[in-house]
Amino acid sequence: MNQPLAERLRPKTIDEYVGQTHIVGPGAIVRRMIESGNIASFILWGPPGVGKTTLARIIANTTNAPFHTLSAVNAGVKDVREVLLQCKSEAGSMFARHRPILFIDEIHRFNKSQQDSLLGAVEDGTVTLIGATTENPSFEVIRPLLSRAQVYTLKPLSDIELNQLFQRAISSDDVILSHGVNVESTSALFRFAGGDARKLLNILDLLEQSTPQDAPIQIDDATVTASLQRNPAAYDKNGEMHYDIISAFIKSLRGSDPDAAIYWMARMIEGGEEPEFIARRMVIFAAEDVGLANPNALLLANATFDTIHKIGWPEGRIPMAECAIYLATSPKSNTAYCAIDAALDYVRSTGNMPVPLHLRNAPTKLMKDMGYGHNYLYPHNYPGNFVKQQYFPDAAGHPVFWHPGANAAEQRSAQLQAHRWSESTEE
């Protein structure tokens, strides 16, 4: 019973695995690979506790291929080279039927040189790579490596899937919990777990440890909530820091409170959060929440992200703090965010309406003869570099997606637009 509950209950076969049916359900791609034993390189991307490492271990348990594991948290280039040399030896063996598999947990923590050291072995078939990451691989994994590995997105577990795990923990034929269990309500349990299987089982671990030996574990909303309030970090070492505190940071920026934003940034830095993660969230915030009220915010946030890579840590904390204060004190607007979402909804509901002929490109004589580009009006040939003409599909009319915010920058843009369209005559 010394092992954490999450480890005691970790599934060993694909049939015991809970969740991610889109990739491991009957006939799904990863299940087919596991059942056939022919594993292709792929990267598992998803939040903590959704089964990335578990899926890799299931592959290790079921495949006939040599299986090696590295954690990017503590493995250096030397470690990578050593395991690749071993894999090359195994791949070249006359008895080898399957390529060696190398699982790298938290692959996003590998820098470019470490990822480069993997590239040749993946490219020439020395190893099959399986990576796991909580960060968007498009940002964190080098493009040549990404092009040689499929990316599968893992989703937070639903309450139904969390309940499957919960029932397995309390009713398994094996002795999983050292106490009986009295279940009255699981609403708070599943709410605090938030789609994270490890968090769910860690909460049960906490309840088990705090229950007297001669009493059953009590599962109800009040008991779960009280236990977690007394032990706010006991069940959540990484998830709380990674998700709850970044949420508080973003909400402080949005609420224009620079001191609170700096406080939450300091909490993340002190807790070991990746600086790139914080900087990337500020880039998103600059576009989503400051937006057109102060377009320079996006430039500064992007420059901050680049600066982190150039000057490193701990000096990088200074431009990050500068950016956070700038974002918090900037005027706010989410009109660009709302506009693109409204346009996407419109496109999904109206389908693929054809591009008007005068807006089409006409690189060939045949296309010109068909009317492509005919009667297009080149705005730079007109006063103020503007002329009225149709830019939407014929059947669309002119729907409005951007509604200018009540800030100086957008009001100036709106006034300029109104002036253009009212003063210009359609040719």
Image: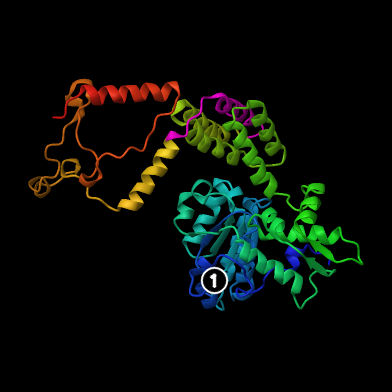
Left or right: 175 as drawn, with respect to 247 = right
The three-letter amino acid code for the residue at tag 1 is Gly
Left or right: 42 as drawn, with respect to 352 = right
Residue 236, horizontal then vertical, whole percent: 73, 51
Q: Looking at this view, is 140 or 215 the one in front? A: 215
Does 334 appear in magenta? yes
Q: Residue furthest front?
A: 184
Compared with residue 66, is residue 373 higher up or lower down, i.e. above or below? above
Secondary structure found at label 1: loop
- Residue 43 visible in rendering: yes
Q: Residue furthest left?
A: 369
Q: Residue at x 53, y 59 (%)?
A: 43
Q: Residue at x 53, y 36 (%)?
A: 285
Residue 155, horizontal then vertical, whole percent: 56, 58
Q: Looking at this view, is 58 or 202 the one in front? A: 202
Does 5 appear in magenta? no
Q: Looking at this view, is 126 or 303 the one in front? A: 303
The magenta stretch spans which residues?
313-335
Category of crowding for the residue at label 1, using alpha-carbon neighbours closer than 10 angstroms: few (below 14), some (14–19), many (at least 20): few
Q: Residue at x 72, y 41 (%)?
A: 271
Q: Residue at x 68, y 38 (%)?
A: 268
